[in-house]
Image (tube, coloured by chain):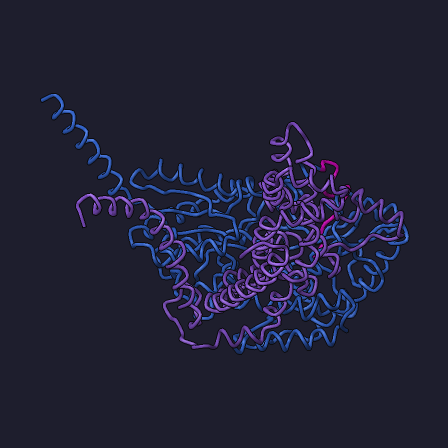
Amino acid sequence: MSNYNKREEATGWLFVIPYLAFTLIFFVVPFVWGVMLIFYKWNLISPVREFVGFGNLLEALQDRRVWAAAVVPFKIMSMFLPTVLVLSIGIAVLINSFKRMQGLLAVAFFLPYLASGVATALVVKGIVSYTSPVNSAISKVIGYVPDWLGNSFLAVLVISLMIAWRFSGYYALIFLSALQSIPNELYEAAQIDGAGRITSFLRITLPQLYPALYSVMILAVGMMFGIFTEPYMLTGGGPNLATHTWYLEIYYQAFSTMRAGYASSIALYNALAVFAFIGVVRKIMQSWGRALGWED
Amino acid sequence: MLRNKSIFVLVVLVCLAMSSAVLAESATFWTAPNPSQEVFWHLMAEQFMIDNPGYNIKVMPMAEAPSSEATILTAIAGSTAPAASENIFIGFGAELVASQALVPLDTLDGWQELLASRNMEEAILSWAFPDGHYYILPIYSNPILYGWRTDILQDLGVDEIPRTYEEIIKVGNIAKDKGLFLMVRPALVKPNWWERWFDFFTLYNAINGDQPFIVGSEVVADDAAVLEVFHFYDQLAKQGLILTQDIPDAFPVGDSIWTELGPWTFPGWKEQYPEMVYGETFELTMPPVPEKFLEQATNKTFGDAKGLVLYAQSSQEELDAVWDFIRWVYSKPENDLVWFERTSLPPVRDDLASNTIFSGYLSNSPALVPYAEHMPLAIPPFTNGEFADIQTALGEEGLIPVVRGQKTPVQAWEDAKAAIEKILSR
């Protein structure tokens, strides 16, 4: 290797080192540490660490709180995904239809994503409180005030809508850039063939949005397994563990009961669930993409 | 030449600065993430360092998110814990003690003198750990009392403040007929473990606070007392007297007439609800008991109490410095008065209600008088490292299903007890 190439290589490594160091310190070391913790009964600070083998992993499998945490993302997903997809695509189409001020509108819809989860939760708490104007109006129609956070179905609905509100602007930006990359000729050709607006949307826009949809689906599904702030602030995981998410359980075990090893074993199951489900979603999306004519 | 001289002078100055910092007895003290407590400790540290120039006490608030317990735990795990911190309740303290993370304060020089100078020789007794040592110096204790909207009671034609479960249910029904709730408490159906302090242990201690809930790894609670509490909530829920949905500030707004209250409430009311005047619009009482227990009830309450600890991982120099600071703070009752004035949290002293130093402040803040008077009747949380799981089980298996009408009180206590025993046997 010439001196020039060696210098080039060294320069390359120099550029990569910060990222490698970051990955090592913040991902690799904690991951290895977390896996090691699984085999111990330990609270992070005690000088005594009891080796329990697979005890934590087995105990987690029999824990109803863990099973509740495994089910809750799917319950939220069933309400969140349709809502956020309709909202974000709708927002993207709306912004795209404006000739001017697209940037300003995009920023306006993106703002909820930047809002603090805690602040948003407090606002939602006010909206669903017993004497809120919303509830007063509802009670005039149906005769009673719905127990938004005390009813299992409604509590999941409130949290799903809240997350959908936060993320729809963010996902809309992804859809907007995809919308803007669709060649106009496709719509013109469809118009000549007599396609109406709805047909154009269903036959051209949606299939052309596939790559963006793919990204959004992966992001959204991954996020479903990491929900914390909204249920922590609003329901504490209740009623009857109906909103008890993976992260609530991991936090509870690590910092309330101080069972770091057990929390790590739940975190491992959480990671496995995320990988497995994202794998399933990828397969489904890829087969849909192939049907639409997109290659893997 | 001039440049060399400048560098030399700079080096000498830096060395001098460093040596003075090293020579000073320095230590870090973490306060609760509460501005008024932070201000108090800053004031104390400044005054202490003026009186004792050889010390350097750094006061800083502990991070609040996600919780102060989590912050302390991670700090100890990362060897970045301060020399001392406040905001420790006895349950969390038990976990820290089991992990050998705390210094037994009674082994330090001047412990007895501190207890004597702060006049807390009686109050400290309930803070002993099973090994006989004291690891937490209690700073404040809030006996949880119940507030009644006496102005609304008068409008409802009720002249006497109810004292028993039966009287409360009767008054609750009168309020219900007028479209009011007896109590608004969304936390009654939330599984958060700390809520059980305020809705369960407050009432349990009133009936039989002398009977501990847990001793060692055994549930020794008074079954009859637990069942009475569960039955009371069962009746309140069944008769539609309590609301488990949220109404912001239901009690001061007048949507409910009865609520548990700690002294931390009043500074906020002063700003937001100046019409809430003790003795005019509301009164404070000890927790109620069932009629049949009126004679033998212990009439105690739950004490939301927290204290300070010294962390064993600190160097001896840091521990010495911070201990000197703490002893100085509690050597004068005037400092406890400053605390009381700034935070409204009653300092743990045997003489709080009788010492004339506090009487001026108490006469200007009459709502705090019942808290000072009832401090000896406040029972701190039980000492068990599994506190979170135990109280979560008490809620999830016991109280919450009762309030929701999903279990009978008997079934709920059987299930909760079994769940707690399982936790204790781990």
Which is more toward the observer, A291 or A116? Answer: A291
Which residue sits at x=43%, y=45%? B329
Percent coordinates x, y for residue A68 in the rendering: 63, 67
Q: Can residue B249 be seen in the rendering of this structure?
A: no
Q: Can residue A189 be seen in the rendering of this structure?
A: yes
Left/right of residue A272 with respect to residue B187 in the rendered view: left
Q: Is residue A23 above or below residue A268?
A: above
**What hue does chain A carry in this figure?**
purple
- Extent of the magenta region: B273-286
Which is more toward the observer, A203 or B69? Answer: A203
* Letter of the chain in blue: B
Q: Residue furthest left?
A: B1
Percent coordinates x, y for residue B152 in the rendering: 83, 46
- Name the main secondary structure of what is drawn in magenta: loop
Q: Is residue A236 above or below residue A57?
A: above
Which residue sits at x=56%, y=53%? A219
